[in-house]
Amino acid sequence: MPPSAPAASPEILPARPPATQGSGRLGRIDAAVHVGFAVLMVASVVRYVMRHSPHDNLLVLGLAAAACALYAVIAVLAQRRRPWAVWMFVLVAAWALLVISAPSFAWCSFALFFLCRTAFTGAVAYIAAGATAAATAVGLFRLSDATDLAMLLGPLAVGVLLTLIYDRIEHDAAEQRRLHAEVSLAQGQLAASERRAGTIAERERVSREIHDTVTQGLASSLLLLEAANRAWPGPGSRQDLRQASELLRRNLSDTRSLVHELASPGLDASPLPDALRQAASQYVPDARLMVTGEPRPVPAEVRHALLRVVQSAAANIKLHAAAAHTTVTLGFLPDAVTLDIYDDGAGFDPAAAAPPSDAGGYGLRAMRQRVEQLGGAFSVESTPGEGTIVAAQLPVRGEE
């Protein structure tokens, strides 16, 4: 059929099965094309035999048999992924002779058109399809004794129309493949980004867990052991040793829990006020606990964050504050839970706090990250010589 827009250079695909290679240029229509060709060929043969004498049938039926044989060869080679484009040239030539000699076979041109577009790309595809359309037009024009111009122009117009439709379908299919590739690439990049973000978040979470359990416990135990060493063999040294031993046991338990599930054993099963009291008493034995509002269960992640904030704040009080009194206040609001840890110790300037380093400084940052990741608010109020208040408020859904 006539070319509508020849490509820059001709290209012959040596072994592309009909309408299946190239990611399904027209979908899997190869079977439909083969069946259509067979049905139309049988109908055309019957029609021709019934309208012509046996003497006229010999040449036409020979050409028809040759065309059928070539078509079968092409179908088999395509199925086996063998080169078959050269055979397609022979089929187009034989078909042109057949349809010019016997226009009854013109209907089979549709199947041959799609086969041409499947076999070739570029200008060669347009030339092969155009030759099929031109041969069909000449055969039908001869059938009308060269008097019906519609018989000449009709096949050419249909060829142009089918070419435009086929090109549009190919363009849409290529665009769809391009978009699919872009989406796949974006999904891969997003997955990689999420994995990186998840790794960073997990490292920060484990860092906070280690700081709030292992690091704080070891630091407090070290202070007690140093105090016992200075007071040895006085009576106070034994008390310091007992406290250091107890802290180390708890620290070992927390370490084992961190390895397995990053949870504090013995705290999750108890009511939240009792768990907070126990967490604070690990570092400040005489810490007081006050509860306001009606106690109720809170989500596990909120409970865990409150426990870690109390542990970290109590460890800081023991290490740095030298406080005489420490009070932990737990408040239950309709849609939130609040926590305040007050001490009357040395205090400090929050704006002048040292940044995190190998020597420490992770406590306040870890507490703030825990609270803010759950949508809460965290604040520290302190003045040198006037004590410190660490405050946190975490939202709690009504159904919880």
Image (cartoon, rainbow, N blue to C red):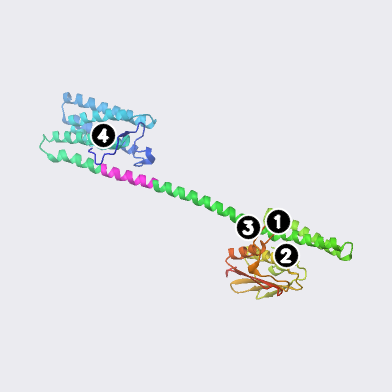
Residue closest to the eye, 191 or 27: 191
Q: Could you give the CA–CA distance between mark 3 and mark 1, rounded to whole angstroms?
A: 15 Å
Q: In this orientation, which residue lies closer to the viewer: 136 or 164?
A: 164
Which residue corresponds to mark 2?
315
Q: Nearer the viewer, mark 4 or mark 2?
A: 2
Query: What label sits on residue 257 in the rendered view?
Result: 1
Quick check: 344 left or right of 85?
right
Amino acid carrying label 4: it is: Ala
Q: Position of residue 155 (x, y in %)?
A: 19, 39
| Residue 291 is one of the magenta-drawn residues | no
User: How far, Cα to Cα, is label 3 from label 2?
Assistant: 19 Å
The answer to whether residue 328 of the structure is visible from this angle is no
Question: Total number of numbered labels?
Answer: 4
- Of the image marks 4 and 2, the number of the one nearer the N terminus: 4
Q: Amino acid at mark 2?
A: Ala
Which label's residue is closer to the chain start, 4 or 3? 4
- Indicate which disc, 1 or 4, sits on the residue closer to the N terminus: 4
Say which amino acid is labelled 1: Ser
Q: Amino acid at mark 3?
A: Arg
Which structural element holds mark 4? Answer: helix
Residue 128 numbered tag: 4
Which of the 4 image quarters holds residue 63? top left
Cα separation between marks 4 and 2: 86 Å
Q: Which residues are magenta?
A: 163-177
Q: Nearer the viewer, mark 3 or mark 2?
A: 2
Marks 3 and 2: CB-CB under 8 Å? no
Residue, disc 3: 205
Q: Earlier in the sequence, mark 3 or mark 2?
A: 3
